[in-house]
Amino acid sequence: MLGKFFKPKWQHADASVRVKSLASLAGDSMELIKIAQSDPDSDVRMEAITRLHHIPTLVQMGHTAGSIGERARQRVIGLAATDHRHDHLLTEVFAWLQNPALLRSIARDSMRGVKLRHQAIAKLDDQELLFSIASNDTSKEIQYSAAAQIHDLAQLQALEKLHGKNNKRLRQLLKEREDIVQHQHKQQADIDALCAEAETLGNTQRWAQEKTRVKVLEQRWQKISKTANEAQQQRFQEALTDFQQRLQTWETEHTQQQQLQAQQAAEQARLAAEAQQQAEAAAQAQQERLEQEQQREAAARKNRQQQQAQQEQTLADLHHSLKTLEAYLEAEQYGEAVEVHKTLRENLKQATHIPGKDQAFFQRRLQALAPFLREIQDWRRWGTDQVRKQLIETAEHLRTDAELDPQERAKKIHSLREEWRKLSQLEPGQQHTLWKAFDSNATAAYEPSKQYFAEQAQQRATHLEQRNTICAQLEALHAETNWENPDWRALQIALNDSRKHWKAAGTVSHKDWKNVNDRFNAAMDALETHFKAERARNWQERSQLVEQAKALLGSPNTAQAIEQAKMLQTQWQISLSSRPSDEQRLWKQFREPIDTLFARAREERQQQQQERDAQLAETTRQSEEQRQRELARQQQQRADLEALAAQSAQHKQADTSADAQIENRNTGELLCLQLEILLALESPAEFQATRLKYQVAQLSETMRSRKETAQPSAHALPVLKQWYALGGMPATSLASQTARIEKIKQALVQVLP
């Protein structure tokens, strides 16, 4: 009877029918998930993904390639804006969620997962949004994460005022930023002091000491000059130039005076020397003649001795080489023997000064060994050619290996060429044909490495172009800005972006780095000159607001004073912040009178907060009572199940006719099957086929049931009660069904609401 039911439409053979049937499936149903994962028609799968609400499945499918994976990723992006349940999965695929509006939504939403919000905040560049999140969010981690992205020190100080008492990391962040600014101010003070010291060079007229002192100053300047502005650079260089000019004038005068004294002393010494030289000239000439004669005799004697020693040494070397050759041949060290034979013949040709009988002796011995040595050389040449052929094969293998790293490839080719060069030294003149094949393969194998190195050079050129573009943008920003009415916030953002892009730009060659880095520093210094003037103006403006705030304390109308204080707060605008400690002091002076006026308002807010806390405590108490009642209800349900089980045992033992037992058995098997399907339990092997038919026939009704409730116990409990109400049945069937019902009852207890 069960086999007569028709298949549901989502299993229809026609893909268009299956597509239409998807509208009847729940967005997180197992059937829709299965269709999206494994339907044979890609259009059906694409439509199923569009309707699917189950993010874990969509994330899994999004890791696949092709249009299916792309559709799944887009669906995840669409659901990510409203689905909070799977934020832990969204953090793993955060690279998909790059829509700016979505990132802002996630960053603001306090209901989203903390890790996901951290990732979204890290992508934000909207300073106002970051300040709003850091100000209003209750999470200390989110407050810190948003504050870390804020560039304006005044905003960080405002956040520290707001949350600093409870957020230690926020206080630490502000301190680090203030330390950086203080360090920059200290560097500027050191630079000014060094310039002032350079301007005192030469004042003591102790020029030798001052020359040493100027070198020390130049070394100190090299360490801090990168942070000096253009005016400071010019001031220091002008001081050095002035000193060098005065030093050069003194050295010129001092040199002229020394030269005049030296000339006078030289003239006196010359007159005395002339008389002495005339007296010694005659004696020197006689002495030189005697010494020259003695030197000629000694040179002739030494030459004869050297020739005799050289002849004896040459004969000794030749005899030693001959003995070495014979020893290598006897030891069968043929490679060494060939080299010694070659050297011995060359040395014998050059030894023309030895007696003829010795020449004849060595010629006879070499002629006697010549046939054997020629045979050895032939074998050696054959072995060298074999090695060369192996090198050619290795080079050919490298040429066809497309997966080898370019740098490793270049090293291996260099090693092969070095081995070939060594072989060429062993057997020169015997490699021309093999060399062409080797060189062709090695050159072809090196081509990918050559291209790789060219690409690296091109990348460095591209990075240099990027850095020059940043410098040009900064220079254009300085030239095109209307400094009478500039947008300081936009300028600050532009400078921060330029610094960020400068850090992110890739490496350039060493020869180009200094020029482009100097250009960048010069452009930044030019902009900083205007920034310094604006900070001073803005400071004066806010100092006047401080005086107005203090004057409000004398107002008799507190409400009116509070309104005026609010107006002053709206006027407190920081275009460019000054030194952190000064900013903190000025802000404190401004806030103290205003905080006094708002004291009463804070007391009222505290009272309201106490009322809300009391209401929250009452709500919590009621929730706990509801939870206890629900726990008691669950315990009662479990007790009812145990009571039903006990009653069922009595029903099964009652007298029942044979036909009723058969009917109870069939009904019980069907009820067991329904319960196992509802609770996703395994059925015995003999009921697998029946279960499959039942599932196919009842799938539409099952899907409607899943739409009505997500809890299987809502359907399983009434079915279980039906089984308990059955009467007797055959003993074998009763034992089998009782075992199945026991597993079902244990599973049902676990999922009871």
Image (cartoon, rainbow, N blue to C red):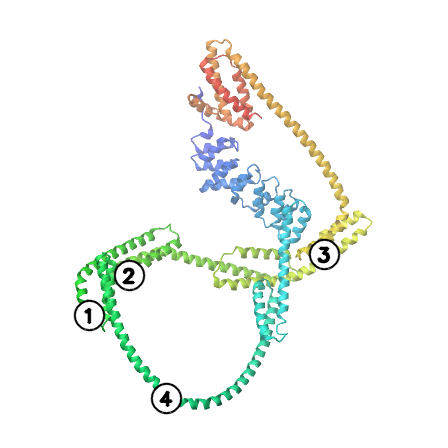
What residue is disc 4 on?
Answer: 286
- Identified by mark 1, the residue type is Gln
Q: Would residue 609 be found to the left or right of residue 266 on screen?
A: right
Between discs 2 and 4, the one toward the N terminus: 4
Residue visible at 56% across and 66% down?
219
Between discs 1 and 3, the one toward the N terminus: 1
Residue visible at 71% across and 34% down?
614
Disc 1, SS: helix
What residue is disc 3 on?
Answer: 542
Q: Is residue 536 above or below residue 569?
A: below
What residue is disc 1 on?
Answer: 359
**In the orientation shown, which residue stands out farthest toward the right?**
556
For the N terminus, give its image quadrant: top left
- Identified by mark 3, the residue type is Arg
What residue is disc 2 on?
Answer: 424
Q: Position of residue 55 (x, y in %)?
A: 52, 37
Q: Is residue 744 above or below residue 65?
A: above
- Identified by mark 2, the residue type is Ser
